[in-house]
Amino acid sequence: MEFEYKSELPEDFQQLCDIFQVQPTAVVKSILDKISFPYFYSHINETGRWPTFLFLELLDENFDEKEMEFNEPYLERINDAVKANLRGGIGTPETKSKTEKAIRNVMREWHKNLAKARAKYLLDNLPNEDRLE
């Protein structure tokens, strides 16, 4: 998926980019590349989690309670994978990899099932004249 985004750069960010000679797009791409629940929950003590913290902060500000009932079982499964990681010796490369893979599988299933549920909702709520007979 690609997207195009145009925005005025905040002064503080623009100044930092100028001072350190960093392209703003490189900063944004770096942050986007690191937003990952599988990484976030399997690399508990690493600074690479910070971009996902930003994402979670955004979710906290714009959280939709209506979807929580659907999402809760998947979040519980992620929690179970994290617990297994803790039992397996936190921080070992083997447990990080195993946990990240388990969470990624949950995320794929969650994403697929949510897409189905949203499509069903849209189809079920089509006006009668828009339905295919």
Image: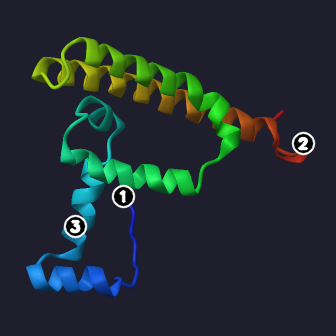
Which of the numbered marks, if any, corresponds to residue 27? Answer: 3
Instruction: Please name which of the two marks, 3 or 1, marks the residue nearer to the observer.
Output: 3
Answer with left or right where residue 87 lies relative to residue 7: left
Answer with left or right where residue 125 lies relative to residue 112: right
Furthest-right residue in this view: 128
State the SS at label 3: helix
Tell me the residue that label 2 is attached to. Answer: 128
Tell me the residue that label 1 is attached to. Answer: 2
Measured along the vertical axis of the image, is residue 2 above or below residue 112? below
Measured along the vertical axis of the image, is residue 98 above or below residue 9? above
Instruction: Please name which of the two marks, 1 or 2, marks the residue nearer to the observer.
Output: 1
Image quarter where the C terminus lies is: top right
Instruction: Please name which of the two marks, 2 or 3, marks the residue nearer to the observer.
Output: 3
Q: Residue at x 34, y 27 (%)?
A: 104
Mark 3 or 1 closer to N-term?
A: 1
Q: Quadrant of residue 131?
A: top right
The amino acid beneath tag 3 is Val
Mark 1 or 2 closer to N-term?
A: 1
Q: Residues within 10 Å of mark 1 (few under 14, many from 20)?
A: few
**In the image, residue 20 lies at what x, y percent?**
9, 79
**In the image, residue 65 lies at what x, y percent?**
68, 42
The answer to whether mark 2 and mark 3 are in CB contact below 8 A is no
The amino acid beneath tag 2 is Asn
